Image (cartoon, helix red, strand yellow):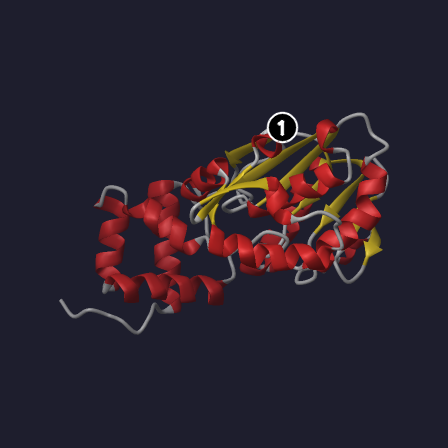
């Protein structure tokens, strides 16, 4: 059989979406088509698969769908990514959170845990970590295993330390890790009151009430219809006057949803829920 390396056609992509939904229950129909096409084509190219072979493996090859899912759900992250975001959260949101006895935080699409631990460090340095519980969720079970370990290469930590400096926090990133040889392990204190679990933003519903939700660099993979569905999920998951933090690259485009939030920082797209 001739191997197709040039990518996937729109018709084949729709066929693949229907197949995956029918066999594995994952619905990619509202993902951005251009982004999804690139990632599926990349898998076909790397594995040297024709479209027929790709479908066959998704249905029949043990473990292949998990690999497919990991490749399709991109996991690019780092600690204190976009330092100005953390500076804004520290200056505009943390003072509000500090007035609560208990604070629940949800980092949606947490990948391998860097954003959850960044928040934990920020909260620790603000002196309110002891009353905060941080949930990290992702669709990808493999990256969640890495998140629970909290072990990162020393090379990455050196890069993350540069981000940390620009947040304006007063400590040192390495204060929060135990470094041995070429790896760094997050301190156990920062793992306390954190929980990593599987959650599918496309199909799963509200699972708690939060004072703060962060979701960055995730919306770009969804079309407008799915973005609105997830915004509705976030709105219903927020406590009254809770904060939704999307970061500088994503925003609330829907006029209907913009009316439901007060803009706290327009550059970092930090919003506060209005009403109850």
Q: Which residue is mark 1?
A: 193
Badge 1 marks a residue whose secondary structure is: loop
Residue found at the far left of this picture: 1
Q: Quadrant of residue 243?
A: top right
| Image point (76%, 55%), residue name | 168
| Image point (75%, 57%), residue name | 269
Residue 207 appears at what percent x and percent y?
62, 30
Residue found at the far top of this picture: 101
Taking depth in this image into account, of 163 and 114 the one nearest to the observer is: 163
Res. 260 in view: no
Please determine whether, in this image, residue 59 is positioned above or below residue 198.
below
| Image point (65%, 38%), residue name | 106
| Image point (72%, 28%), residue name | 130
| Residue density around tag 1, few if under 14, some if 14–19, many if 20 or more, within 10 Å | some
Please determine whether, in this image, residue 188 is positioned above or below residue 119.
above
Residue 250 relative to residue 170: left or right: left
Taking depth in this image into account, of 239 and 15 the one nearest to the observer is: 239
Residue 180 relative to residue 254: left or right: left
Q: Quadrant of residue 218?
A: bottom right
Residue 6 appears at what percent x and percent y?
30, 74
Residue found at the far bottom of this picture: 6
Residue 33 relative to residue 231: left or right: left
Res. 44 in view: yes
Which quarter of the rendered picture does the N terminus lie within? Answer: bottom left
Residue 142 relative to residue 48: left or right: right
Which quarter of the rendered picture does the C terminus lie within? Answer: top right
Please determine whether, in this image, residue 139 is positioned above or below residue 6.
above
């Amino acid at each position: 059989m001739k191997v197709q390396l040039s990518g996937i056609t729109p018709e084949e992509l729709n066929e693949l979406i229907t197949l995956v939904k029918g066999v594995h229950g994952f619905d990619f129909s509202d993902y951005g088509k251009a982004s999804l096409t690139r990632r599926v084509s990349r898998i076909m190219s790397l594995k040297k698969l024709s479209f027929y072979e790709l479908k066959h493996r998704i249905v029949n090859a043990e473990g292949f769908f998990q690999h497919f899912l990991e490749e399709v759900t991109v996991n690019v992250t780092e600690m204190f990514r976009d330092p100005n975001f953390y500076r804004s959260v520290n200056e505009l949101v943390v003072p509000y959170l500090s007035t609560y006895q208990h604070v629940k935080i949800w980092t949606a699409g947490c990948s391998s845990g860097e954003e959850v631990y960044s928040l934990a460090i920020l909260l620790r340095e603000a002196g309110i970590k002891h009353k905060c519980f941080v949930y990290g969720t992702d669709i990808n079970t493999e990256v969640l295993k890495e998140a629970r370990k909290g072990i990162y290469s020393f090379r990455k930590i050196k890069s993350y330390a540069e981000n940390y400096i620009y947040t304006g926090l007063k400590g040192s990133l390495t204060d929060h890790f135990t470094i041995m040889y070429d790896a760094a392990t997050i301190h156990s204190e920062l793992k306390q009151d954190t929980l990593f679990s599987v959650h599918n933003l496309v199909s799963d519903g509200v699972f708690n009430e939060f004072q703060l939700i962060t979701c960055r660099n995730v919306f770009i993979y969804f079309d407008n219809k799915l973005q609105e569905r997830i915004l509705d999920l976030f709105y219903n998951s927020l406590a009254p006057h809770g904060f939704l933090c999307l970061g500088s690259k994503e925003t609330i485009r829907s006029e209907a949803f913009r009316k439901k939030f007060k803009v706290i920082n327009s550059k970092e797209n930090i919003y506060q829920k209005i009403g109850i």
